[in-house]
Image (tube, rainbow, N blue to C red):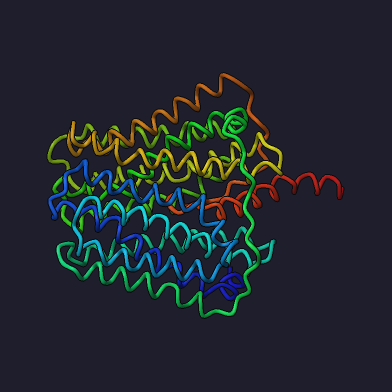
């Protein structure tokens, strides 16, 4: 890890600051919207806007990079994101907030794509897996730190929005001032949705459903917490706990998936997360907040590895040259699910109240588990050659996908090369 850090420390510092800023804004807006008098339905559409913009960015930003270059796209999107963040408290209108969230999602997706391209350009092929793991760790650390900063501030005044805007603005300085050459940008050719479905129905359905899970966990926590009567510090603690669960459980789950039928691991992990959500939904009145944090840890710890699990499982049924295209399509499918997630959750919260948060996430995770079990009856398991690569679902971009696929392909080819050498 030391060589990776030595080569790419400006990027990691900038990314940490960026994730602190982005990690605050999602939770902050959920709470501030309630203070501004927005309804749950209105806030659900506002929060869904980010995922719509992120999906749009994943499709359009690669073309922008090819046309005008990394540096110009990076600077333009960074300054736009910073400006958007400062406008939220100045213009508390539903239509404006929706537009700003869409623009934020687009900008952050573009920034991630450029940053990850820079990381790839500074990392040798034999260190790319370690670089990606460190990059994911920095992202998680930034989001957890963001919740601590959010809990110490006041969502009702202007200061947190200023802090977020400053953090996002300053995050670009280390990268833009580093003397790192950037290669031409390349992206995978698209794969048809029919071909993707034929290759892996479980990957297709699973990642669509998980889009709703991730959008709920990373976009609606502030809205749910305000509706549930939680204090700002409690909301921050809940959000941080889901990310801590994700960070701790990624590698053990990945280790298991590389050594047994991935569908069994997918079904088991999704089922454990669903049961945790069910228990939280049915908890007796007056249950302590510590119990809710425990449910958040299990929910986040089980839901987050599922993205990488389903990606690796899909790749088990593909030729190496098809993996990048399939993974990019899966990103698109997941993004469609993420757009609908907050909107549906908003309706559920209106119908059954705060317990609807856990009920909604649990239902989607339960559906993933049941579908995985059903798919086990439809065809034999594919041979797994390893290749699980940890990912942060809330920040996955086409570049992350490409890097993860390269690591998977290297793992799949390693046994064949060893056999030829013998």
Q: Residue at x 35, y 38 (%)?
A: 340
Q: Residue at x 37, y 42 (%)?
A: 339
x and y percentages locating residue 313 in the rendered image: 59, 37
Q: Is residue 76 left or right of residue 148?
A: right
* Relative vertical location of residue 192 with respect to residue 51 in this rendering, above or below: above
The image quadrant where one finds the N terminus is bottom right
* Relative vertical location of residue 36 with respect to residue 181 in this rendering, above or below: above
Of the pair 148 and 79, the residue shown nearer to us = 79
Of the pair 292 and 222, the residue shown nearer to us = 222
Where is residue 190, by image quadrant?
top right
x and y percentages locating residue 290 in the rendered image: 23, 48
Total labels drawn: 0
Of the pair 392 and 130, the residue shown nearer to us = 392
x and y percentages locating residue 228 in the rendered image: 16, 44
x and y percentages locating residue 219 in the rendered image: 32, 49
Q: Residue at x 62, y 39 (%)?
A: 191
Q: Residue at the top extreme?
A: 377
Of the pair 396 and 59, the residue shown nearer to us = 59
Where is residue 7, by image quadrant?
bottom right
Q: Residue at x 32, y 54 (%)?
A: 101
């Amino acid at each position: 890890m030391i060589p990776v850090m030595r080569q790419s420390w400006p990027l990691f510092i900038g990314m940490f600051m960026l994730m602190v800023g982005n990690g605050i804004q999602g939770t902050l807006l959920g709470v501030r919207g309630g203070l501004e008098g927005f309804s749950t339905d209105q806030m659900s559409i506002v929060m869904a806007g980010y995922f719509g913009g992120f999906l749009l960015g994943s499709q359009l930003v690669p073309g922008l990079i090819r046309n005008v270059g990394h540096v110009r796209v990076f600077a333009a999107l960074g300054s736009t994101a910073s400006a958007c963040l400062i406008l939220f408290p100045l213009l508390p209108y539903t239509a404006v907030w929706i537009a700003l969230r869409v623009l934020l999602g687009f900008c952050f997706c573009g920034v991630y794509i450029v940053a990850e391209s820079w990381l790839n350009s500074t990392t040798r092929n034999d260190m790319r897996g370690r670089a990606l793991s460190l990059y994911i760790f920095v992202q998680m650390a930034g989001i957890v730190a963001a919740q601590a900063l959010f809990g110490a501030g006041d969502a009702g005044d202007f200061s947190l929005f200023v802090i977020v805007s400053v953090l996002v603005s300053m995050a670009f300085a280390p990268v833009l001032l580093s003397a790192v050459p950037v290669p031409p940008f390349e992206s995978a050719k698209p794969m048809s949705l029919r071909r993707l479905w034929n290759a892996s129905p479980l990957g297709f359905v699973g990642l669509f459903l998980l889009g709703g899970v991730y959008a709920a966990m990373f976009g609606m926590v502030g809205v749910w917490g305000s509706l549930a009567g939680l204090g700002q510090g409690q909301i921050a603690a809940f959000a941080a706990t889901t990310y801590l669960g994700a960070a701790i459980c990624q590698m053990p789950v990945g280790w298991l998936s590389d050594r047994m039928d991935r569908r069994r691991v997918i079904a088991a992990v999704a089922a454990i997360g669903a049961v945790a959500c069910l228990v939280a939904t049915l908890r007796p009145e007056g249950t302590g907040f510590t119990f809710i944090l425990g449910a958040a840890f299990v929910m986040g710890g089980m839901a987050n590895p599922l993205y990488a699990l389903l990606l690796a499982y899909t790749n088990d049924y593909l030729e190496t040259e098809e993996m990048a295209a399939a993974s990019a399509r899966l990103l698109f499918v997941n993004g469609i699910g993420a757009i609908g997630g907050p909107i549906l959750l908003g309706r559920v919260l209106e119908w059954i109240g705060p317990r609807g948060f856990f009920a909604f996430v649990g239902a989607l995770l339960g559906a993933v588990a049941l579908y995985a079990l059903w798919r086990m009856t439809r065809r034999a398991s594919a041979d797994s050659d390893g290749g699980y690569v940890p990912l942060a679902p809330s920040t996955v971009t086409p570049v992350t996908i490409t890097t993860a696929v390269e690591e998977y392909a290297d793992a799949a080819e390693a046994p064949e090369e060893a056999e030829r050498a013998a």
